[in-house]
Image (cartoon, helix red, strand yellow):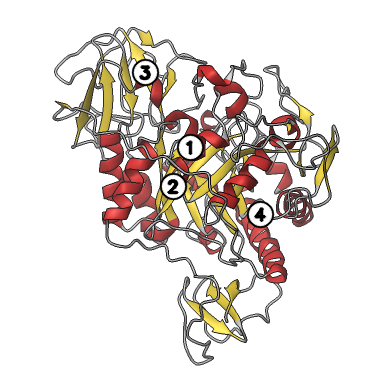
């Protein structure tokens, strides 16, 4: 799960303190590894990035790719203050060279207005403590020092845009092909999704508010910052992280509003409304805005709220949860939280099971991005058994940084001995007492290679702060660069495609040119004339044709 922690203790930048990610299991997981081998970690991937200013191209293209693959990373709004990880760190570590899409986490939903909003109101752990919560200070108000700024220039008084938003804008100036999306919801802030999606009127209002705030950049005025258009042009789309529509109580945040009867249909309609309004805004601007979603791995959760493949008519792609298959909610059994393949442990699932479920329902593999954790889940008092601790009894959950049983990857990279099991596609580190399920560079290489073989669209990392030395995201990027070109094929600015032909049938994803504009088919289409449809157009604008 993706959980905002606005009330977590704050740490100075120099400490680089890690923070755990709290999550609720979506399925029991794991199996005793059939064959385990101690493995030396591959050489860390670390690339220095120069701080040259690169002009932003006038590119209408919505998507981005690295040799035909997406490499998505979540940047947490609270990372600079809580973890000492800044957008500048993202650039200087080399991560910015490896990541194609940055999802900024998270945006909240107003408890009564049911709109997107920004507020200077930190959340609290009490019931209802996150209703109306927001961290506008981190988002766009707090001044960033020259030391922490991407370009070495400090924020000044009177600047309309400061904080993380301004740093992300500077990131895009240096890396103009990187796409930045606003991620809505997450584990803690999904509480009011169900209400916001409940009626056509509430959906239209909610989506319009999100586009006004994040796409048009009309920020509230707080402490002299913000105002109309202050963040215009920053975000290239919206990432919907509703956890989880219609799903059973065991999968939900305890305060979530859930409508098990209607959430599934309402969620599909909500995505359709996002697609409609984003396309309308894009058509007016000659730009293709992205729409993605964080999608579950559990079949129970998928069946409850995710109408696949229909929702993928509206989504550009989905980032599938690639972790939390097992964790501290089972305190006396150490096991894999992110095994790629099935294991012999009863009652468990694998990431491959999740991907295959979507594929079996007709989802285009290019629209599926596999999540990879940059954090670990651990147990203490673990017996070695005959599997180097995998699926062995444990005395309890291991101590964590911010929460028990949870540490960032960089805290675990030298813990004990590294093990990797090719049968389950899982790695862990074990010192004879503490056993940590954590993806190592070897596991990431294994998964990224599988992604290329499967024809998937790429990978997603939660979260970038956990891999601040660019070992995991860089490993995935290296695999993609070395592989045959992947299925994601962004449109080059100004390129022309074969002209639209009324007598031709087009499958979803095909791009045509018509009257100086490029369009991508959202689904199978034949006689619809590009550019003439007002509601739910079959042809979506992806740029101009010179």
- Mark whose residue sits in front, 4 or 2: 2
User: Residue 157, located in which quarter of the rendered image?
Assistant: top right
Give the number of the disc on residue 92. Answer: 1
Q: CA distance from mark 4 to mark 3?
A: 37 Å
The image quarter containing residue 488 is: bottom left
Q: Which residue is mark 3?
A: 378
Question: Can you name the residue that lies furthest to the bottom here?
Answer: 503
Q: Earlier in the sequence, mark 2 or mark 1?
A: 1
Image position of 251 with respect to 316: above or below: above
Q: Please tell me how crowded label 4 is: few (under 14), some (14-19), or many (20+) other residues with Cα within 10 Å.
A: many
Horizontal side of residue 239 vs 138, given as left or right:
left
Q: Do tag 1 and tag 3 residues touch (Cβ < 8 Å)? A: no
Residue 261 horizontal/vertical position (percent): 62, 46
Measured in 3D between alpha carbons, the distance from the residue under mark 2 to the one under mark 3, in whole angstroms, is: 31 Å
Task: Tell me which residue sits at (77%, 44%) in the image.
Answer: 115
* 4 or 2: tag closer to the N-terminus: 2
Q: Which mark sits nearer the N-terminus, 1 or 4? A: 1
Between 115 and 356, the one lying in front of the other is 115
| Residue at which label 2 appears | 97
Q: Disc 2 and disc 1: Cα gap in Å? A: 10 Å
Residue 40, how many percent across, how many down?
A: 19, 27
**With 113 as the anchor, is 270 left or right in this view?**
left
Residue, disc 4: 270
User: Are there few (<14), some (14-19), or many (20+) residues within 10 Å of tag 3?
Assistant: many
Depth check, mark 2 against mark 3: the one in front is 2
Q: Secondary structure at mark 3?
A: strand
Q: Earlier in the sequence, mark 1 or mark 3?
A: 1
Specify the label residue 472 is tagged with.
none
Disc 1 vs disc 4: which is toward the camera? 1
Residue 442: x and y, percent? 25, 35
Residue 20 visible somewhere in the drawing: yes
């Amino acid at each position: 799960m993706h959980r905002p922690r606005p009330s977590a203790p704050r740490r100075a930048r120099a400490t680089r303190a890690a923070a755990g990610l709290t999550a609720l299991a979506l399925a029991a997981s794991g199996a005793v590894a059939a064959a385990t081998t101690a493995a030396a970690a591959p050489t860390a991937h670390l690339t220095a990035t120069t701080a040259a200013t690169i002009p932003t191209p006038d590119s209408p293209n919505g998507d981005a790719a690295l040799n035909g693959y997406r490499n998505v990373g979540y940047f947490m709004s609270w990372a600079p203050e809580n973890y000492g990880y800044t957008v500048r760190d993202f650039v200087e570590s080399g991560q910015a060279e490896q990541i194609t899409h940055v999802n900024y986490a998270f945006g909240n939903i107003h408890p009564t207005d049911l709109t997107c909003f920004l507020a200077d109101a930190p959340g609290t752990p009490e019931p209802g403590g996150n209703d109306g919560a927001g961290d506008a200070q981190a988002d766009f108000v707090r001044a960033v020092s020259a030391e922490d700024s991407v370009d070495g220039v400090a924020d000044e008084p009177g600047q309309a845009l400061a904080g993380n938003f301004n740093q992300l804008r500077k990131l895009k100036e240096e890396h103009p092909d990187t796409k930045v999306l606003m991620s809505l919801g997450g584990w803690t802030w999904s509480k009011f999704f169900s209400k916001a999606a409940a009626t056509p009127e509430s959906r239209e209002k909610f989506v319009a508010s999100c586009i006004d705030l994040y796409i048009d950049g009309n920020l509230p005025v707080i402490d002299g910052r913000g105002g109309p258009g202050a963040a215009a042009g920053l975000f290239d789309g919206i990432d919907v992280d509703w956890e989880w529509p219609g799903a059973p109580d065991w999968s939900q945040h305890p305060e979530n509003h859930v409508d098990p009867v209607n959430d599934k249909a309402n969620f599909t309609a909500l995505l359709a409304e996002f697609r409609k309004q984003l396309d309308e805004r894009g058509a007016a601007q000659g730009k293709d805005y992205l729409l993605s979603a964080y999608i579950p791995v559990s079949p129970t959760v998928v069946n409850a709220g995710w109408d696949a493949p229909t929702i993928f008519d509206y989504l550009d792609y989905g980032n599938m949860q690639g972790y939390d298959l097992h964790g501290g909610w089972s305190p006396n059994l150490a096991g894999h939280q992110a095994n790629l393949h099935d294991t012999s442990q009863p009652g468990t699932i694998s990431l491959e099971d999740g991907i295959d479920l979507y594929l079996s329902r007709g989802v285009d593999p290019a629209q599926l991005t596999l999540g990879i954790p940059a954090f670990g889940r651990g147990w203490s008092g673990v017996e070695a058994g005959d599997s180097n601790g995998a699926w062995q009894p444990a005395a309890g959950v291991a101590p964590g940084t911010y929460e028990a049983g949870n540490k960032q990857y960089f805290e675990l990279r030298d813990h004990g001995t590294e093990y990797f099991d090719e049968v389950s596609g899982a790695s862990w580190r074990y010192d004879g007492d503490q056993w940590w399920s954590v993806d190592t560079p070897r596991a990431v290489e294994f998964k990224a290679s599988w992604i290329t073989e499967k024809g998937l669209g790429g990978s997603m990392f939660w979260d970038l702060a956990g891999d601040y030395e660019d070992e995991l995201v860089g490993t995935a990027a290296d695999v993609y660069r070395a592989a045959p070109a992947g299925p994601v094929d962004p449109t080059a600015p100004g390129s022309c495609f074969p002209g639209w032909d009324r007598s031709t049938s087009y499958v979803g994803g095909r791009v045509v040119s018509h009257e100086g504009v490029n369009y991508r088919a959202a689904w199978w289409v034949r006689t619809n004339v590009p550019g003439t449809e007002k509601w739910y157009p079959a042809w979506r604008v992806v740029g101009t044709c010179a």
